[in-house]
Amino acid sequence: MTSTDATPPLPPLRPTRQRRAVVEAMASFADFRSAQEIHELLGERGEQVGLATVYRTLQRLADAGEVDVLRTEDGEAIYRRCSDSHHHHLVCRSCGATVEVEGPTVERWTSAIAAEHGYADVSHALEIFGTCPRCR
Amino acid sequence: MTSTDATPPLPPLRPTRQRRAVVEAMASFADFRSAQEIHELLGERGEQVGLATVYRTLQRLADAGEVDVLRTEDGEAIYRRCSDSHHHHLVCRSCGATVEVEGPTVERWTSAIAAEHGYADVSHALEIFGTCPRCR
DNA sequence: GACATGTTGACAATCATTCTCAAATAACCT
DNA sequence: AGGTTATTTGAGAATGATTGTCAACATGTC
Ligand SMILES: [Zn+2]
Ligand SMILES: [Zn+2]
Ligand SMILES: [Zn+2]
Ligand SMILES: [Zn+2]
C-alpha cells in the first residue's frame, strides 16, 4: 500500500509465435507434463521452439497463474493449464489423470491452524494422490 | 494382501558409525535442511561422512518414515526428523521454523473428495506456509 | 526505414542427486 | 581368532533438469 509503487515499470511482454505455440500446446492436454515433454509435443506439432524458451515461457505462465506447477517425487517440475481460481489437485498416481478440486473446508482449516500459531501471510499447497477409476 | 509376499527378502541394514551420525545430526535441529547442509553439519561436528552416504541414509530414513521430506520452490529436497504419526507442516517462509500440525478435518475432506471422484488408495500432501511470530 | 528493447536459441554452465566400484566393515561360521 | 560373505562406504565420474550467455532476431513506435 505504499504510495510510490502504483505501477512499477513492468516490461511489455510481446506476443510471439513461440509463446502462442506453448499456450496452445498447454491447451491440448489435461494432465501434468514436464517442460521437456511439452517441448517434444511442440516438435511433433511442427512448432519449432527452443527448450530454453519453453522453460522461460512456462515460468512466466506459472508466475501469471496461468498454469499450475507440481513437483514429481524426484523433484521434476510438471505443468498443466488451470482455472483461474484457487484450487487443489486430485492426481492419479498411475496415469496422471487430474481433477481440480476446491472447497472452503481446507481453506478454513489452514487459516485457523496458522492463526492459532501466530503465522501471518499464509498460503498452502495440497495435493491428493490416488488411483483413478480407469486404472483400478 | 496377496499370500506370497509376506516378507520379501529385505536386506538386513547394519548399524554403522555413519548412520548413527546422521540420525544424531537429524536430532540436533528442528527445521528442514537440505542433504548438503546436513552433510556440512556433520563435518562441523567432526563426523566425517561421505556426501553420497548422507543422501543414501536420508532416503532410507525417509522411506522408513523417520524423517519428513519436502521440496523447496526450486525442487531441492529438504529433510527434518518427525514424529511417527501422520501430520502436516506449518513452515515459516522466512526462517524455516516448523510446526507439525494435524487434525481430522483435512483427512476427512481429502478422503471424501477422492471417494467422490472414484479415486482409490488415496494419500495426500499438505504444507502451510506463512511468516512466524518471530519474523513479523 | 531506423531505433530501442524484449525475445529467441544453440550451447555452455550449474548443481543437486545418482552411479560406479574397489576398499572397508559388519555379521556369521568354525 | 581366522576365514567367508553380504553390506556399506566414499571419491569421483556421470546424469539430468534447469539456468545462464550472448549474438541474431522480432516487435512496437516514431
Ligand atoms: Zn489413472
Ligand atoms: Zn486451498
Ligand atoms: Zn520465522
Ligand atoms: Zn493428512
Image (spheres, coloured by chain):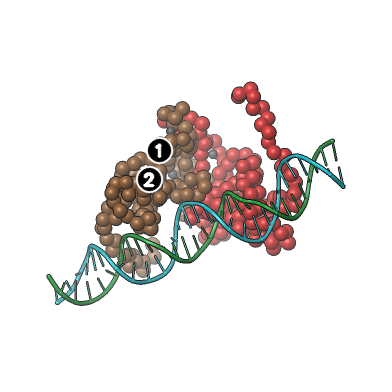
Chain colours: A red, B brown, C cyan, D green
Task: From the viewer's side, name the closer residue of A46 and A107.
Answer: A46
> A87 left or right of B15?
right
Residue drawn at the location 29% of the way across and 61% of the way down: B13
How crowded pointer 2 is (Cα within 10 Å; few <14, some 14-19, many 20+) is rated as many
Residue occupying the point 56% across, 59% down: A95
State whether residue A81 appears in this view.
Answer: no
Q: Is residue A39 visible?
A: yes
User: For numbered disc 1, what is the local secondary structure?
Assistant: strand
Asked if residue B71 lies left or right of residue B54, the reply is right
Alpha-carbon span between mark 2 and mark 1: 9 Å
The chain ID associated with circle 2 is B
**Front residue of B4 and C6:** C6
Q: Which residue is mark 2?
A: B80
User: Does any atom of ligand 3 lie closer than 8 Å to the CB of label 1?
Assistant: no
Which residue extends farthest top? A3
Q: Is mark 2 within 8 Å of ligand 3?
A: no
Asked if disc 2 and disc 1 are in contact, CB closer than 8 Å, the reply is yes
C28 is higher (above) or lower (below) than A125: below
Chain letter behind tag 1: B
Discs 2 and 1 lie in a common subunit: yes
A69 on left or right of B28 = right
Q: Residue at x 43, y 40 (%)?
A: B89
* N-terminal-most mark, 2 or 1: 2
Q: Which residue is mark 1?
A: B98
- The image shows residue B65 at horizontal and vertical percentages of 36, 51
Q: Indicate the amino acid at tag 1.
A: Thr
Report x, y in % for residue C8. Answer: 70, 53
Image quarter in which the N terminus of chain B is found: bottom left
| Vertical comparison of A62 with C10: above or below | above
Q: Which mark is residue A91?
A: none
